Image (cartoon, helix red, strand yellow):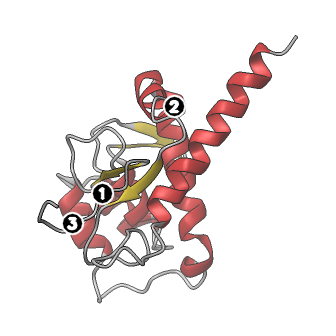
Amino acid sequence: MSGGLFAETDLNALYFSRSDADQLLGAWSPHPFQLEAREWPTVEHYFQAMKFADPAYQEKIRRAESPKQARKLGRTRFKKIRADWRKVKVVVMTRALYTQCRTYSHKAGALLDTGDQRLVENSSYDYFWGCGRDRRGTNMYGQVLMNVRNKLRQEASDHQTP
């Protein structure tokens, strides 16, 4: 048995970090895309900006130098988060990831290449977007990616059907 965050191995799961810019499936992946009539440097920039109703603050986040800086701005306690954020945050993440995959065929291809693997955001501290230290988290980021993967598959299937 190996050490580390997870000692056991799940052979049908792909573990990744959404905050690793080198990982194509991550929210920090540097693949700009168009949404809400603006270009977003990363999914993280878009997601953090959409927490706020204030267009000027959204723009400040959009222009952040890095996804890390965008996340920092999005976590401020000095700006009021939009009232419906808890209800819409998964939809916001889904729209961003789907749009990015539709923009970059190699990103969509990488997602489709995961087959039926369970995708797990390997975060020891985030029990909503990630799996958490004890793997009992919701893994919502992984679920969103799997839903986007299913939608891309369905679209490819519909396109091939005469």
Q: Quadrant of the N terminus?
A: bottom left
- Residue 54 position, x and y percent, is 46, 72
- Residue 45 position, x and y percent, is 34, 55
- Please give the name of the residue rendered at 27% of the width and 63% of the height, measured from the top-left corner: 8
Q: Which residue is mark 2?
A: 112
Q: Is residue 3 above or below residue 9?
A: below
Q: Quadrant of the C terminus?
A: top right
The nearer-to-camera label among 2 and 1 is 1
Q: Is residue 152 left or right of residue 40?
A: right
Q: Is residue 1 left or right of residue 9?
A: left
Q: Which residue is mark 3?
A: 7
Q: Which residue is mark 1?
A: 9
- In terms of secondary structure, where does tag 1 sit? loop
**Residue count near mark 1 (Cα–Cα under 10 Å), binned few <14, some 14–19, many ≥20:** few
Q: Report how far apart the C-alphas of labels 1 and 3 lie in the structure.
A: 7 Å
- Residue type pointed to by label 2: Leu
Closer to the camera in the image, 110 or 94: 110
Give residue 123's quadrant in the image.
bottom left
Badge 2 or badge 3: first in the primary sequence: 3
- In terms of secondary structure, where does tag 3 sit? loop
- Please give the name of the residue rendered at 32% of the width and 79% of the height, measured from the top-left corner: 134
How many numbered discs sit on the rendered protein?
3
Q: Residue furthest top?
A: 162
Q: Is residue 125 above or below residue 149?
A: below
Badge 2 or badge 1: first in the primary sequence: 1
